Image: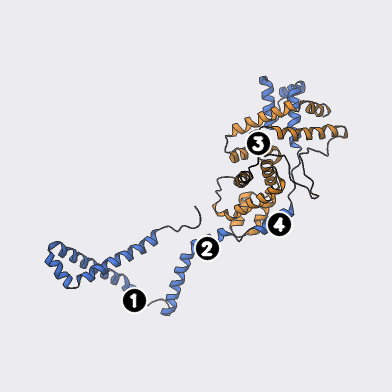
Amino acid sequence: MIDATCRLVRQTLESESVLSPDASAHLDACPACRAHAVLLEAFARVPSRAPDEAAVRRIIAALPPAPWQRRRLATWLPLAAGVGLVGTGFALLGGVPAPGAVAELPGVAGGFLSWLGSSVLDAVAAARASSDAVRVTLAAEGLWLVLWAAVTALGGGWALRSLVRPVTGGRG
Amino acid sequence: MPEDDAEVLKRVLAGDEGAFATLVRRYEAKLGVYVAQIIGSAEDARDLVQEAFVRVWCNLDQYNPRFRFSTWLFRIAHNLAIDHLRRRRQPLVSLSLGEDDEGDEIRLDPADDRRDPAGDLANRELARALSREIDRLQPSYRELVVLRHLIGLSYNEIAELKNLPLGTVKNKLFRAHSVLRETLEPFLAGVGAKS
C-alpha cells in the first residue's frame, strides 16, 4: 500500500503539474516516487517516428476519385436538371413568355381544377343516387371521366411525392 | 503553429484535395505504430494504414465534427486491425515501431542526446527493459500506454477513442505506470541516481 502523500505526488507527476515545495521535498526523500518520476521522464524521451514521405506518397496515390464529390453532384443534379429544362423551355419559346400568357396561367389552372372537381363530385353523387343514374352517367361517357380523374390523381400524387420527398444521397 | 485538423478538413471538403496530404503526413507514422502494436506486424500495418486513409477519404463528407478527426481515424484503423486479426486468427503483439530506411526494426529507445555519457548505458538498459515490460503488460494497460507514450495522444483523446471515462483512462494509466515502476525498480533507481 502506498501512503496518501506518495499517491498525491505521483498523481501530480502524471498530470504534469508543478510540484509544491512539500511534494518536491517528498520526492527527494522517497525512492519509489523518484522512480515513478524517472519512469515518466523515460516515456517523455521516447522519440516519435518521423513521417515517411514515401508512405505518404503511396497513400495519396492510392486514393480513389473523391466519392463524396460524386455524392454532392447527385444531390444537386435534380436542381441542375430543372434549371436546364427551364432554360430549354425559354430557348424553345424564344425568351420569357409574354406577361399576358403568364398572368393567365393561375386563372386557367384554377378553372380547370374546379371543373375537374365538380365533374368528379357529380359522378360520385350520381353513383350514390341510384344504379339508373350510374347507367346514365356511364352512358354519357362518365366512366371515361372517372378513369381520367383517377389517372390524374395518381400522376399528381406521384409528382407531389417527388417534390416533397427529401433527396437522399449515399449512405446515411 | 500547425493548422488544426478541422481547418485542414474544411479545405479538403472545399475542393483543396491536396490538403489531405497534410493529414496523412500528420498521422501516418502514429497510425503505423498503433496498428503494428495491435497486429504485431509492421509490414501488414503499412497496408492497413493505407486502407484506413482510403476509407477516411471515401467518407469524408460523413465525418462528424463533434469528434476529433484523430479519434475517427484511429477508430477506423483499430477496426481494420481487429478485422485483420480475426482473418488471421493471430493474437497480439509486439512493440515494433515499424522499420527504418534500411529495413531494420525500430524499437522503443528513449535515447536522449542531452544525457551525459555516464548515464548512457543505464538509459539504454532502461529503454530495453521498458520495451520488454510494456510488452508484458496486460493488453488493456498496454494499449493505453502505447496510445499515451508512443503515439502521444492526450488523456482526452484516449478517452474519446476508447470510449472510456476520462477518470478511468487516468486510473488505468496510473496503475500501468505503477506496475512498470515496480518491475523496473532496479533500472529506474540506476538512472535516478545519475540524474
Element under disc 1: helix
Q: What residue type is labelled 2?
A: Leu
Q: Name the residue under label 2.
A: A73
Q: What residue type is labelled 1?
A: Ala
* Marks 1/2: CA–CA distance: 35 Å
Whether labels 1 and 4 share one chain:
yes
Residue at horizontal 63 percent and vertical 34 percent from the top: B140
Q: Name the residue under label 4.
A: A57
- Chain hosting mark 1: A
Image disc number at residue A101? 1
Residue at horizontal 29 percent and vertical 70 percent from the top: A109
Chain A colour is: blue
Q: Mark 3 points at which residue?
A: B144
The vertical placement of B178 against B85, above or below, is above
Depth-wise, is mark 1 or mark 4 nearer the camera? 4
Chain B colour is: orange
Depth-wise, is mark 4 or mark 2 nearer the camera? 4
Element under disc 2: helix
Extreme residue toward the bottom, this view:
A94
The vertical placement of B11 against A14, above or below, is below
Residue A92 appears left or right of B129: left
